[in-house]
Image (cartoon, rainbow, N blue to C red):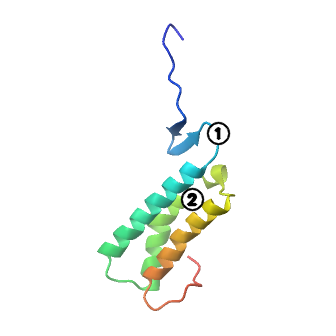
Amino acid sequence: MNDVQLECVSEEKYLGVIISEDLKWQKQCSEAVRKANRMLGMIKRNFIDRSQETIILLYKSLIRPHLEYCCQLRSPYYKKDIKLTEGVQRRATKLVTGIYAGIKL
């Protein structure tokens, strides 16, 4: 275009969504899980109150948006992506003191 060479890239981040050349969403899922796990670590380090109400409120306000951003577009259908996403919820459940793993966040 106007004697300018266009760069060829394998993936591009657009509006916070990583789009790869093969249109697979593995990178986007792993990035969302990475951000959610970082937020869980921050909650674990900085909050002393680990009651069920507190953790659910923090999960819904700080972690869930990372996992649900553009989920209609990328909707994880590979088992490994689903396991990654569910692993975040499992880890959040373990933060609550005196609770079993069957809680729905």
**Residue kind at label 2, given as amino acid type:** Glu
The total number of labels drawn is 2
State the SS at label 2: helix
Residue type at mark 1 is Asp
Figure quadrant of the C terminus: bottom right
Measured as percent of width and height from the top left, residue 41 is found at 37, 69
Q: Is residue 17 above or below residue 93?
A: above
- In the image, 84 versus 75, the foreground residue is 84
The answer to which image quadrant residue 80 occupies is: bottom right
Q: Position of residue 86 (x, y in %)?
A: 58, 69
The quadrant of the image that shows the N terminus is: top right
75 relative to 16, above or below: below
Q: Nearer the viewer, residue 34 or 10?
A: 10
Give the answer, above or below, for where 48 lies relative to 28.
Answer: below
Mark 2 = which residue?
A: 68
Q: Where does label 1 land, which residue? A: 22
Q: Is residue 67 above or below residue 21?
A: below
In screen coordinates, is 64 left or right of 78?
Answer: left
Is disc 1 placed on a helix, strand or loop?
A: loop
Image x and y of residue 84, in percent = 56, 64
Q: Going by the image, does 39 lie left or right of 70?
A: left
Residue sitting at x 47%, y 65%:
63
Mark closer to the chain start, 1 or 2? 1
Q: Which residue is at the front of the view, 94 or 15? A: 94
Q: Residue at x 64, y 39 (%)?
A: 22
Identify which residue is drawn at 49% across, 53% down: 31
